[in-house]
Amino acid sequence: MKCARCSRPMIEPAVSIKTRSGLYGYGPKCAAVMGLIQAVQRARANPARKQETSEDQMDWIEDDPST
C-alpha cells in the first residue's frame, strides 16, 4: 500500500479513511501533518551534570613544579 498524500510505500497505514472511491491510507508523518493523529513527542534528554572539583585533588596543569 502507498500513502495517499506522498505515495511512499508502507506496510500498514497509520490512518485509514473510507471514501466513496475506496480506502485511503496515510502514513504516520502525513497523518500528523494533516492533523489526523498527534505527532509523536520524544522525551527530552537529561541535562549534563556539572562537574564537581575536589579540593583534595591537585590541579596538574597550573601547579607543575618542574617548570
Image (cartoon, rainbow, N blue to C red):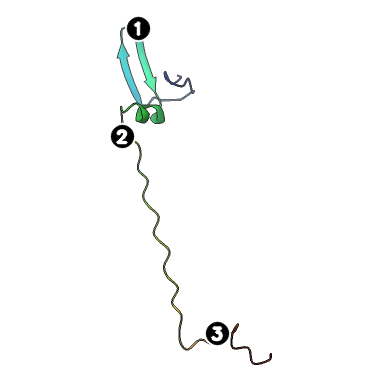
- Residue 8 is tagged as none
- Residue 21 is tagged as 1
Mark 3 or mark 2: whose residue is earlier in sequence? 2
Classify the position of the C terminus by image quarter: bottom right
Residue type at the position of mark 1: Ser
Residue 53 placement, left or right of 59 = left
Q: Nearer the viewer, mark 3 or mark 1?
A: 3
Q: Identify residue for label 3.
A: 59
Classify the position of the N terminus by image quarter: top left
Question: Tag 1: Cα neighbours inside 10 Å, few (<14), some, or many (≥20)?
Answer: few
Q: Nearer the viewer, residue 23 or 65?
A: 65
Regarding mark 2 in the picture, which secondary structure is present there? loop
Q: Quadrant of residue 11?
A: top left
Q: Quadrant of residue 51?
A: bottom left
Q: CA distance from mark 3 to mark 1?
A: 75 Å
Q: CA distance from mark 1 to mark 2?
A: 26 Å
Regarding mark 1 in the picture, which secondary structure is present there? loop
Q: Identify residue for label 2.
A: 38
